Amino acid sequence: MGAPPTRPADRALTKPRRRLTSAVAALIALLAVGAGVLVGLSTPAPAPADAPEREFSAARAYRNVEVIAAEPHVAGSAANDRVREHLVATLRGLGLQTEVQDAVAPEAGQLSGAAGGATLARVRNVVARLPGTDPTGKVFLVSHYDSVQTGPGGNDDAAGTATILEVARALTTGPRPRNDIVFVLTDAEEACLCGAAGFAGDHPLARDGGVVLNLEARGSTGPVIMFETSRNNAKLVEVFGKAAPHPVGTSFAVEIYRALPNDTDFTAFLDRKFVGLNSAYIDGGAIYHTPLDVPARVDRGSLQMHGDNALGLAREFGRTDLGDLRAGHDDTYFPVLGGLVRYPGWLTLPLAVAALLAVGALGWLLRRRGRATAGTLAAGFGLTLLPVVVAPLGAWLLWAAITTIRPGYTELLDPYRPVWYRLAVVALSAAVLFCWYALLRRRIGPAALAFGGLAWLAVFGVLLAVAVPGGAYLTTLPALAGALAGFAALATRRDGPWPVVAVTLAAAVAVVILLPPVVLLFPALGMGMGAVAALVAVLLGLAVLPVVDLLHPRAGGQRGLLALRARRLGALPAAAAALAAVVLAGVGLAVDRFDAAHPVPTHLMYALDAGTGKAAWLTREEKPQPWTDGYVDRSIAVADDFPGLGNSEMRAGPAAAAPVPAPKLDLLSDTRTGDQRVLRLRVTPQRQVRLLTLHVDTSTATVRSASVAGRDVPVEPGGGKWGFGIVFHAPPPEGVEVTLTLVPGAGAVSVRAMDASDGLSGVPGFRERPEGVGVVGSHSSEMLAVARTYPL
Ligand SMILES: [Zn+2]
């Protein structure tokens, strides 16, 4: 294939300086649009403590964050009791009918199935009601007040809980809403979502369902993103766009979230007949679930955004007729410069097909006008796959190299200061794209390459419309805008201003639509999956190519020395971006070092078999940090000795036996009918523990049915020796009663009980972490587990 033919007239009209001026003007316009996008995603200024009483104030809410997150307060702990008393007193102080729902509740979703059995918890939810004047239904404001055992939960979820307290205060100052507003501060979210499941399943106020607004955080900063909805969300999204002052949300996030192994209290409500919206801020994920998640690490701007949106939505849902909020369809929606654009999901596929047809028609026109040939169009399409594949691969390799230099990153959701690495990935994507473009532009021609980019965007649009409809807008709309710009450019004088205006407008559409996902995907997925953001960045780059092309001399415009100089200039953006990628990665490594305030995360736990006196140090770190490596020396499967710890391989090392008692097991009754035995047991922890597990060796008996604290639990065949198990979080001091109906084998039935507390100080052989070594945010960090087998 050769360069596309250029008409003599075009050549004569080439004016490099004017072209450069157009390029600079267009790029400045795009930078302005990009800046507008970033402003639209930024957080509002926090309102001071003396803000009008009808408004939400981050400063007022923050006072409650400080009380709630004064110390770690895991479900069942004395610290959590104190938090609950504060919540009850605060809500009663507002004149709200407030009660504590004290119940044993099952888990929601499939969160902790891996932890070794049917999961329950003793929960104490704080529930307050603001009765409506003429209710058509109920609005539920939900957050969890418990924290993980490893940190005080300043962001997760004291921020959400304090937001609800401040929203409740604001709602009680004005005229009463039409609908009931119910404030649900749940317990044991971190353990098993059990508090939310207990409320949604058992509480009288939950019987008729309603609208749930769940408030979460999985980091410490950044915009609050409405990332999850119930199905058929069109009416809910309409209210969100109208009533949330900062409506950052995208139908793409819903799809991303469904693909991730995460859950929040919202899941428990979705399991029932509720509709609703789930919101969280997620940047600053390095401190998530760690001791560093203290009140001071709560971004007041994020807190203000949480509150502004929650209050706006509570007021709007408070006056809306809640009779029929379930629409017939989902909406596609995304943030545009501080607002929310939405259209019905059933438009997704027709739009995607229209974009594909438009891009096809553009290709046909380009060929007719002599801007490309069938060959160059085909080559443009085929070769565009190169940057689409190479840039994400490059991002992945870059992160692999960085984690080789700094292995501690593998245990972090995101680095402490990730911005340099994010920019490095963007620069790397740009370098790949510019380099590819500079190499192919003369041979394939800018028109055919622009066509290739738009064609892939359109193809992705159709694929997404079929598989991930909420994300199809990301590529469909830029492809459609690009094709329309192409038509406009071909319909006007090539040397006039309109082609530049048209391609710049289309590029602006791409920036508005694709820049937010680039910005939000980094914190959502972490640097380990920076390749996804790189992919989106390349798609954005492809849509912007016709503007980038203005930096190059017009195709076929120069000959001889001038062309050589121009080609060198054309290589400049690629070289600059590549250099930027290297420099930014280097700056990241230099700036984001581990130190006392940014410790390298480590995972350690201790497990004791009280029957044999054998003990072990265990870690979930795959390549242990130097500190952890001092405890472990081999890989073992823990499931046989500690079925409550799941069935994965862990690194382990020998430990001395600590004088810690195993849970006591009392046989309350033992009745035999036919081949069945019914065992009524009480398992009682002999110390303050966070969880209790009980497993049956299914080679000694087949479990037919089981109940825990009077509640039936599912009996599903599990793998391994301990084929049936129960996990009970926040057990009361008097223990938990378990009834097992089973068919025993020839000998005694073998039952293993385990319990676990938090904190390793005082365990023989444990050395406190030095400065710069921290605790990883995990549900098993610092766990002290003791197990014992009882033959019955
Ligand atoms: Zn959490």
Image (spheres, helix red, strand yellow):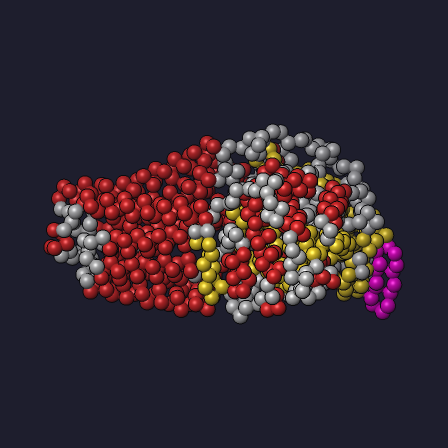
Residue 611 x/y as whole percent: 79, 45
Residue for point 77% across, 61% down: 711
Q: How many marks?
A: 0
Instruction: Answer whether residue 381 is visible to the viewer in this image.
Output: no
Left or right placement of residue 588 versus residue 288 in this view: left
Name the image quarter holding the N terminus: bottom left
Task: Give the camera-side residue of 235 and 540.
Answer: 235
Left or right placement of residue 668 versus residue 123 in this view: right
Residue 671 x/y as whole percent: 87, 63
Residue 557 x/y as whole percent: 16, 49
Query: Was residue 295 drawn as part of the magenta stretch in this picture?
Result: no
Query: Was residue 680 drawn as part of the magenta stretch in this picture?
Result: yes
Residue for point 41% across, 54% down: 513
Task: Give the camera-side residue of 248 and 767.
Answer: 248
Instruction: Answer whether residue 100 is visible to the viewer in this image.
Output: yes
Q: Which image quadrant is residue 148 in?
A: top right
Residue 399 x/y as whole percent: 45, 42
Q: Main secondary structure of the magenta part?
A: strand
Q: Taking 472 as reference, is 769 above or below it?
A: above
Q: Which image quadrant is residue 179 in?
A: bottom right
Residue for point 17% across, 44% down: 563
Q: Which residues make up the magenta segment?
A: 667-681
Q: Taking 770 as reference, is 699 above or below it?
A: below
